[in-house]
Image: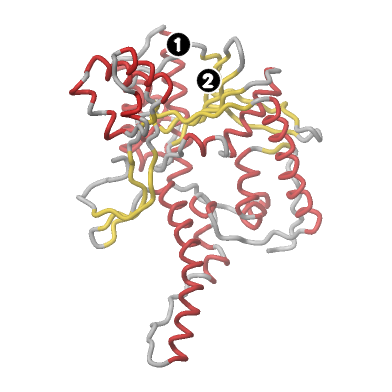
Amino acid sequence: MPNTQITPPDAYSQSSLKMFASCPGAWARYRRGDEYTPGAPLIVGSVFADLSAAYDDERRRARLAVLDGSHIEQVFDHVMSGHPEAAPYTGELRSLFVEYAEREADMTGLSEIEKEFAGVHTPKGRHLKGRIDRVYVGTVGVTVRDQKTDRSMLSRAAAKDDFQVRLYAYSAHRLYGVNTVIGQLEFVRFGSRIRDAEFGLTDLEVIGEEMDRRIDAVEAACETQDFPFTVGDGCAWCHYSGDCPKIASLSKKADAIVIVDEDSHRRVATEYLALKLRLGMVTDILKSWSTVHGNIDVNGIAVGFHLSERYEYPVGPIAKLLEAADMDPLMFAKIDATKIKKLAKSAPGIWSGIEAMRTDASRTEFREKRSKGGDDDAE
């Protein structure tokens, strides 16, 4: 890297902190001002955020739950006219936006759309900045929502570990003076399914300390000017992955493997153990890339994420419903979707109550699946 002194920023965004954690080398290139061409994931994600914000602004202004088709097209054309760089992705963005616009979203409690913040401080007084897609203010706490155009969908349990949600929850805590924040991820490619997590005061204090630790690492690297390149999840989003020295060094093809005697047997077995470890790394890289760019077809096999729809049922309330109907709850002690859904035919009255209680537990799984042609990402 040329002898250009890299200095810490005055304020830290989630994208800056996330980039540094993924690859200090890429972060340093960005800070130095190296030129780059934004890729499709960055363009689609940012333009969709502008589209959804413009749509929700118009809905709120017009006091309508949804807008009709002509209004949807007007909003789309207006926003796209300000983003010439998004022209190659017009079809994809129109499809995402129209599907989003046609869903009746509840705007109850919606306080701010695209909440910009720059005055949030960490416990050590560092400045944080960013933009929260949606803020809902309630009587107990605040809900912050981040819209995702990813092609993979997190489980509810994983939502609480999402770095962006964590930073936005902490920012809402400081901005609004509340000690309870609900962080939400809205996966727009999967019918705007919501994955949420509750953050209490202890959680929020831990997040503040986490932000300071991340910034400590940035400042320490700037002191030593040591910014190593690393390969990992961030490569799928990285502006510089096309000419990364680390990726180039890892792009060599493996030699043919043949076993002819005990020595070669031991050598291949040793290599197998190493490859098994490497397979985990390769899988993680494929997952990261597929999250951003979608599945890839290899000889009729679609490799990537495929939606597996699942629902969770609360045991206690369901047991009470069954008892009220003179049915033994022990028959359903291990409640699973296959067994409980049979009630839809045998006891529709009970099923209607159970169906209202179920929680959407769908998520994507990274696996191989024979493709049927076309885009299989949101199956």
Q: Which amino acid does label 2 sit on?
A: Ile
Task: Tell me residue 134's x, y (percent).
Answer: 53, 22
Q: How far apart are marks 2 and 1 (CA)?
A: 10 Å
The residue that mark 1 highlights is 60
Mark closer to the chain start, 2 or 1: 1
Q: 330 above or below 58?
A: below
Q: Residue at x 47, y 31 (%)?
A: 195
Q: In which quarter of the image is residue 350?
A: top left
Task: Tell me residue 92's x, y (percent).
Answer: 33, 38
| Depth check, front residue: 107 or 118 | 107
Cβ–Cβ under 8 Å for marks 2 and 1: yes
| Depth check, front residue: 29 or 263 | 263
Q: Which residue is drawn at 52% across and 26% down?
A: 145
Number of numbered discs present? 2
Q: What element carries label 1?
A: helix
Q: In which quarter of the image is residue 306?
A: top left
On the rendered image, what quadrant is the N terminus found in? Answer: bottom right
As drawn, is 2 to the left or to the right of 349? Answer: right
The residue that mark 2 highlights is 113
Q: Residue furthest left?
A: 345
Task: Tell me residue 160's x, y (percent).
Answer: 56, 35
Q: 213 above or below 66?
A: below
As drawn, is 147 to the left or to the right of 209? Answer: left
Badge 1: few (under 14), some or many (20 or more) residues near its Cα, within 10 Å? some
